[in-house]
Image: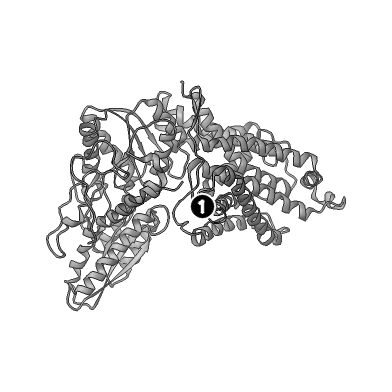
Amino acid sequence: MNELPQQLVNGLLLGSMYGLVAIGYTMVYGIVQLINFAHGEIFMTGAFGALSVYLWVLPNGTTMWIALPLMLIGAMLVASLVAVGAERFAYRPLRGAPRLAPLITAIGLSLALQQAVWAWYPEATSARTFPQIEGGPFHIGDVTIQTGDVFLLAAAPISMGVLAYFVMKTRTGRGMQATAQDPDTAKLMGVNTDRIIVVAFALGAAFAAVGGVAYGLKYGQIDYRMGFILGLKAFTAAVLGGIGNIYGAMIGGVVLGIAETLATAYIADIPGMDQFGSQSWADVWAFVLLILVLLFRPQGLLGERVADRA
Amino acid sequence: MRQRSLIAITAALSAGALTLTACGSRDSDDKGSDSGGTTVTIGVDAPLTGDLSALGLGIKNSVDLAAKTANKEKFVEGVTFKIEALDDQAQPSSGQQNATKLVADKSVLGVVGPLNSSVAESMQKVFDDAKLVEVSPANTNPALTQGTDWQNSKKRVYNSYFRTATTDAVQGPFAAQYLFNDAKKKKVFVIDDKKTYGAGLAATFTEEFKKLGGAVAGTEHINPDSKDFSAIATKVKNSGADVVYYGGEYPQAGPLSKQIKAAGAKIPVVGGDGIYSADFIKLAGASAAGDLATSVARRSRNCPPPRSSWPTTRPRTTRRPTRPTAATPTTRPGRSSRP
């Protein structure tokens, strides 16, 4: 059992990435009740944005300590731009339409973004290598942490802190809370709800972009399909944590990541379960967990409202 | 990370991928001689887009080259060859649609492809019903030509299906023998992707490795849609295995190898022709030095000239996809020359 701490760290890392992406799902849902299925692709465009900065903006051989912050800014800019564009041209015209219309639009947009990157980003038809941070892995007792993962370990809590401050303390953040509670009343009180919605999309995209950079640093490669499965997992994490709740998104992500990792690592050791233990079954166990949680807490781990006012 | 030092090997490997198909496509030329028509279409089915496109485009380009050569050198007097290449995206369903399309096209006299054994499974019957010959340069699953019960009784189910690659009944045991006898590896961790090719290859390997007296430290099946293999990498590290055998293809094998090494298990990852690609090196990075792949094609310089006898198939020598380190394989690696 000496591998348990390492597996927990593996799960925590995977889950933090789910969490960073899940924030975008949960914020957009909280404010416009839209499940933005293109959010996984916004995460992907963020990663490609960071790669573009590294390849074409920075001079060759820039050290990662200088490159990384600039790549992060590039990633956030690209992802936010794509998200705001999506909001403006794909979702806003459908604001009053039945719920299913924007949902289908989101799925279409997701495919369109994938294919656009595939077709127009240089050499994106197969996976592209992502720059790595130099330096060996760190050992803490039995646990090995890769250099690229240190970024994720730091970025996830910092992002949560920034987001909590923004939503709780700033004027725009309070406007977001008001819009989430009741858009019509918020509008009557002078909140510019259109602007709030744009901010929610942009903010969610920026966190997804941080996740995208973390993905590149962790796995060393990015491809046009990287956001699809991860987006689904992040959406699951958002539901697990209680959709609409930003802390729930991160907690849901971490719970999901750890559940998947532990299922891969240990289910096979249970006598008679070796057929159900491999990584290909990990997703099944993760969803079993989701169903169990929703059975006893339909609002998710941290969700507040049971009834949705739609 | 820039890997300039690997470019030379990368170039050699991509040329090597061509040798796979250089032998196979020649067969298409033969069939043309039976027809007296002026233009003969050779169908091609391979993953031309997506993760496996590096191998798929190799197949397509090789058939294209063979057709052009045949036209230029007038292998068949009065017949012009052209190719019709369809993309199966490594999906059995797309492969079957393509097969139906090729069957419907009366000018198609033969088909080269596919790359994936799982895709071949879905195409075989369509071609056999239409009596259209299909030659795969890359399928290695034994069941395709020997029936699902091939271990006990070999039975050829589809007469119109041929291949120029050898089967995993040869490739898997070959890797097991090399690892056990030559590389002196005694404890293997077997991983596969649960697909027709990968699971079949891992099974033939495991059987032979156990027969030789080796131990299996653990088995694991990955989810091909995932890129996160950290949980598996930790298991591999703690299993005490001295080698990993992977049944599957390079899009997953590259990251898997990288993450196994990153977890602290400095042991080679070994696989079949599915990881025998320059892209494996690109994805796995510098830490993949010492990983091995077996390939199933003959050396291109041994290819008989066009229209001679059917090429005998046997596994090619084990060779390293990365720069060679300590032990050298028993046979010399084939240097690929352009056909």
Q: Residue at x 37, y 48 (%)?
A: B5
Q: Position of residue A20 (x, y in %)?
A: 62, 41
Disc 1 sits on a residue from what chain? A
Quarter placement of the C terminus of chain B:
bottom left
Residue A288 is left or right of residue A82, and the answer is left
Q: Is residue B71 above or below residue B191?
A: below
Q: Where is residue B249 in the image (x, y as percent from the top left)?
A: 36, 46
Viewer can see residue A277: no
Residue B50 is left or right of residue B210, and the answer is right
Q: Where is residue B254 in the image (x, y as percent from the top left)?
A: 40, 43
Number of marks = 1
Residue A167 is left or right of residue B316, and the answer is right
Q: Is residue A174 above or below residue A257?
A: below
Q: How crowded is mark 1: few (under 14 residues within 10 Å), some or many (20 or more)?
A: few
Q: Where is residue B303 in the image (x, y as percent from the top left)?
A: 17, 58
Question: Mark 1 falls on what kind of element?
Answer: loop
List the residue tagged with mark 1: A60
Residue situated furthest right in the rendering: A189
- Amino acid type of the residue tagged 1 in the rendering: Asn
Q: Which of B118 and B232 is in front in this view?
A: B232
State the image quarter where residue A94 is shown. bottom right
Residue A289 is left or right of residue B237, and the answer is right
Q: Is residue B104 above or below residue B173?
A: below
